[in-house]
Amino acid sequence: MSDTEVMAGIIRDRILSLLRDGKRIDGRGLEDYRELEIKVNVIEKAEGSAWVKLGNTQVLVGIKVDMGEPFPDLPDRGVITTNVELVPLASPNFEPGPPDENAIELARVVDRGIRESEAVELEKLVIVPGKLVRVVFIDVHVLDHDGNLLDATGIGAIAALLTTKMPKVAYNEGTEEVEVLDEYEPLPVRRIPIPVTMAKIGNTLIVDPSLDEELVMDGRITITADENGMISAAQKGEGGSFKLEEVMYAIDTSIKKGAELREKVLEVVKST
């Protein structure tokens, strides 16, 4: 057995021992988030941006709005595309190169939470039906990984979208040309989906797992819900299994904790 495996075993035993008493390795309660900091409009040349620090996890989200063709099966809808870059300096486990399965999962879960909640009114992003629409690029850079990238990224993405301002455009049907005007309008955002991630360690579920907790967890579940309690995405990861009552508890907790996180997001957005 390697030194790393021995250390992981020691940490797991310590975490399990604390959980039996309803405690966590960093002193939090089972449903407590780490300290959350949010800043918006942090990238000058982006249409929208946000920096999120959750404990020691840090992510930076930038929004770029361009023009392009709609999806063939959705001619009357704008397009959203999400990309995640795991910066090698953020973790010794991140390597340069194309996105790995972790980056792909992170991008898909965040994208699904926003898309399926219909957070952005995509029908309002159409310039020429079937031909030309707005394309919203959500670019995520993980700066420091200390656990729960899913929630930090999801919070950063919706905060950035809420502060996005895009240039107005005018379409000339005669010449079929598009003029980009020197005026700006907010991105039409109507829902505020927030992801809440819980880790299962032994028989205990905990909110907002730190990296130490993630390294020894038996499973992970993320529920994304909007302000109406409507679930737009659910993702189970890292193996393990969840009983029905555990899933129901995760859903109830995600709606409750999501409301608290949403309030923090709106407080920051309204202050800008």
Image (cartoon, grey):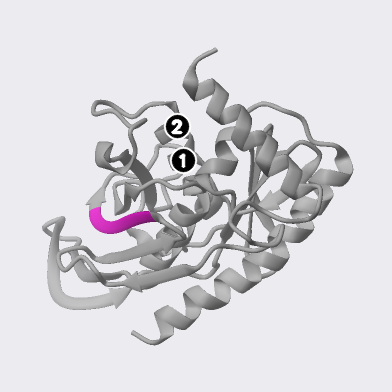
Q: Is residue 7 shown left or right of residue 89?
A: right
Quadrant of the drawing holding the C terminus = bottom left
Please tell me which residue is depicted at 43% across the width and 41% down the height of the picture.
107
Q: Which residues are magenta?
A: 58-66
Instruction: Quadrant for residue 240, please give it.
Output: top right
Which amino acid, by three-letter code, is at mark 2? Asn
Q: Is residue 217 visible?
A: no
Q: Of residues 93 and 231, which is closer to you in this image? A: 93
| Image coordinates for residue 260, horizontal then vertical, percent | 62, 73
Q: Is residue 12 shown left or right of residue 54?
A: right
Q: Residues within 10 Å of mark 1 (few under 14, many from 20)?
A: many
Which structural element holds mark 1? helix
Per the rendering, the mark at residue 102 is 2
Q: Is residue 61 shown left or right of residue 230?
A: left
| Image coordinates for residue 76, horizontal then vertical, percent | 43, 52
Please tell me which residue is depicted at 46% across the width and 56% down the height of the picture.
152
Per the rendering, the mark at residue 106 is 1
Which amino acid, by three-letter code, is at mark 1? Leu
Quadrant of the drawing holding the N terminus = top right
Question: How many labels were placed on the picture?
Answer: 2
Answer yes or no: do the residues labelled 1 and 2 have beta carbons within 8 Å? yes
Residue 15, relative to residue 226: is it above or below?
Answer: above
| Image coordinates for residue 224, horizontal then vertical, percent | 62, 54
- Residue 148, magenta (yes or no): no
Please tell me which residue is depicted at 35% across the width and 42% down the height of the picture.
84
